[in-house]
């Protein structure tokens, strides 16, 4: 274990480095009195046996985690084409701005008069997001996209309750291509999920939607462009139909990167919009965070926004709570440093830069879609927006090559795989989102890798090469079925297996 470990070697667990008596830190005496745990903690809360923690030196500890770090993949290393995730390169200027002491050293509980700079920034960010989305006002409190979804649905509930209709309006409609968080958020907010199907062009089936709409519908959640990477051609008719029965139209902002400066959700007829600023505007994301999911609303929903909100007060700024606020959805002002990165990104790009970013993102996705046409099936044969969904169904039928096999083989060829098996309505789906930050050279290399996987399987008449992948990564192919059926979410050194 003392020799350098390469990617092909198996890295020991931190427990395997443990030797009794070793430690990675020591503290000089403070000359302060000390107490035993028994003197500080009631007996009923004391553990009878010592916690099984590793005992390692600082040298081994640093080396272990540094080696693990070198085995990770990130947006700074190369293309990260996960569909519907917008894993684009994040400019370091945004990180630099988020590290300025004038921001980082302000305590969230600082008095308003001592945090005017922060409040000014948050107000400017809200106004910018409202200008981008065509909304009237926004809350910056939600900590991520899913938190934004729940906040939006709580606002929907508050609006109907104020109109005396909350008991009757119990259903929320979502497309069958929706993100998985949509039905989860609907259920968590106390509504009933109703699913509407997809038409032959990949849009919402308008006739089916009209058949589902009634005065018991609270609203509809919709992503536009959809998770199929397609713009909803009937969005005006969809908005009109939902509004005609008294429902609200909710915009899932996961795919906002496709339409910045081109079209606004508010102009399409949406009443509530959540934004994933951590992916659209410059914060590296993944692994559970960090995130921020501001929610913007039309004027009739503004009185229900979470509070307190930073607002303008003459020449300065203050915190105010809307008249019929649903209350806090996050402590303090949300994930403020993530919001600061978004503010920096927006200032760096400006309106023309944001529009250009969306145009390039759409161009890249369409180029890639055409490049792999023929080798892979095209899910819906019309121009895509920021991402495309291709399918390995024909490959699977011909030689047994699945979407998962393609993804694993791509790892061997040096690329992070795309999203697989989503949307669920496309068999053997491979969802690719190139984003605007990847060069033509990178996109060409990624497309060539896709084509190589398909070609070598067809030429061999089987998928053996791909099914053996990955063989060049620190962790080989895992048993997905076993992992799902025998879920172990924590490591316990005391477990024999």
Image (cartoon, rainbow, N blue to C red):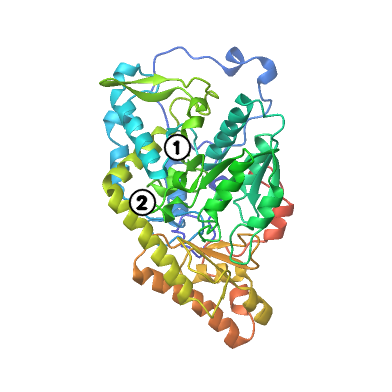
Percent position of residue 448, x then y? 45, 77
Residue 427 point in image, percent of width and height: 65, 67
Residue 376 lies in what quarter of the image? bottom right
Relative to 421, residue 327 above or below:
above
Horizontal side of residue 322 vs 45, given as left or right: left
Q: Residue furthest front?
A: 244
Label 2 SS: loop
In this view of the protein, can residue 56 be seen by the observer? no
Graded by Cα atoms within 10 Å as few (under 14), some (14 to 19) or many (20 or more), the crowding at tag 2 reads many
Which residue is pictured at 72% across the width and 57% down the height?
482
Q: Nearer the viewer, residue 336 or 24?
A: 336
Q: Is residue 264 left or right of residue 250?
A: left
Asked if 381 appears above or below 474 in the picture, the reply is below
Q: Please give the name of the residue rendered at 50% of the width and 34% of the height, measured from the top-left corner.
A: 142
Residue picked out by circle 2? 261
The residue depicted at 61 percent of the width and 47 percent of the height is 241
Q: Position of residue 378 (x, y in %)?
A: 56, 72
| Residue at 38% over, 25% down | 310
> Secondary structure under badge 1?
loop
| Residue that carries the numbered disc 1 in the rendered image | 24
Compare marks 2 and 1 and give the one earlier in the sequence.
1
Distance of label 2 from label 1 (alpha carbons): 52 Å
């Amino acid at each position: 274990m003392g020799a350098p470990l390469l990617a092909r070697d198996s890295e020991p667990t931190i427990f395997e480095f443990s030797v009794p008596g070793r430690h990675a830190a020591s503290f000089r005496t403070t000359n302060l009195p000390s107490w035993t745990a028994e003197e500080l903690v009631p007996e009923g809360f004391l553990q009878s046996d010592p916690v099984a923690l590793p005992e390692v030196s600082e040298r081994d500890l640093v080396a272990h985690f540094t080696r693990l770090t070198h085995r990770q993949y990130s947006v700074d290393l190369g293309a990260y084409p996960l569909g519907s995730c917008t894993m684009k390169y994040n400019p370091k200027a945004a990180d630099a701005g988020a590290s300025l002491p004038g921001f980082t050293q302000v305590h969230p509980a600082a008095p308003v008069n001592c945090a005017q700079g922060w409040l000014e920034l948050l107000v400017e960010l809200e106004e910018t997001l409202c200008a981008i989305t065509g909304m009237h006002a926004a809350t910056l409190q939600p900590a991520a996209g899913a938190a934004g979804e729940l906040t939006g649905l709580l606002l929907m509930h508050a609006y109907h309750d104020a109109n005396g209709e909350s008991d009757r309006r119990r259903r929320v409609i979502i497309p069958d291509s929706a993100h998985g968080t949509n039905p989860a958020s609907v259920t968590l907010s106390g509504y009933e999920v109703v699913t509407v199907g997809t038409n032959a062009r990949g849009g919402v089936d308008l006739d089916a939607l009209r058949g589902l709409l009634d005065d018991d519908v609270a609203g509809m959640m919709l992503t536009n462009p959809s998770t199929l990477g397609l713009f909803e051609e009937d969005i005006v008719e969809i908005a009109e139909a939902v509004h005609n029965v008294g429902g609200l139209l909710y915009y899932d902002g996961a795919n906002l990167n496709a339409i910045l400066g081109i079209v606004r959700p508010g102009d399409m007829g949406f009443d509530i919009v959540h934004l994933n600023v951590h992916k659209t505007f410059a914060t590296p994301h993944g692994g559970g965070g960090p995130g921020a999911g501001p929610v913007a609303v039309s004027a009739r929903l503004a009185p229900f926004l979470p509070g307190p909100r930073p607002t303008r007060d003459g020449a300065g700024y203050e915190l105010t709570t809307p008249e019929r606020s649903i209350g806090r959805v996050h402590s303090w002002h949300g994930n403020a440093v993530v919001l600061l990165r978004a503010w920096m990104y927006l200032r760096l790009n400006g309106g023309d830069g944001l529009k250009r970013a969306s145009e390039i993102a759409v161009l890249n996705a369409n180029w890639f879609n055409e490049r792999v046409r023929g080798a892979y099936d095209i899910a819906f044969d019309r121009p895509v927006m920021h991402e495309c969904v291709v399918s390995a169904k024909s490959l699977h039928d011909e030689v047994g090559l699945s979407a998962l096999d393609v993804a694993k083989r791509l790892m061997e060829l040096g690329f992070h795989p795309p999203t697989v098996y989503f949307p669920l309505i496309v068999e053997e789906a491979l969802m690719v989102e190139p984003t605007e930050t990847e060069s033509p050279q990178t996109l060409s290399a990624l497309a060539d890798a896709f084509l190589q996987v398909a070609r070598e399987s067809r030429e061999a008449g089987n998928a053996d090469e791909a099914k053996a992948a990955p063989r060049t990564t620190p962790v080989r192919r895992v048993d997905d079925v076993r992992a799902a059926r025998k879920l172990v979410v924590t490591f316990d050194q005391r477990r024999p297996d």
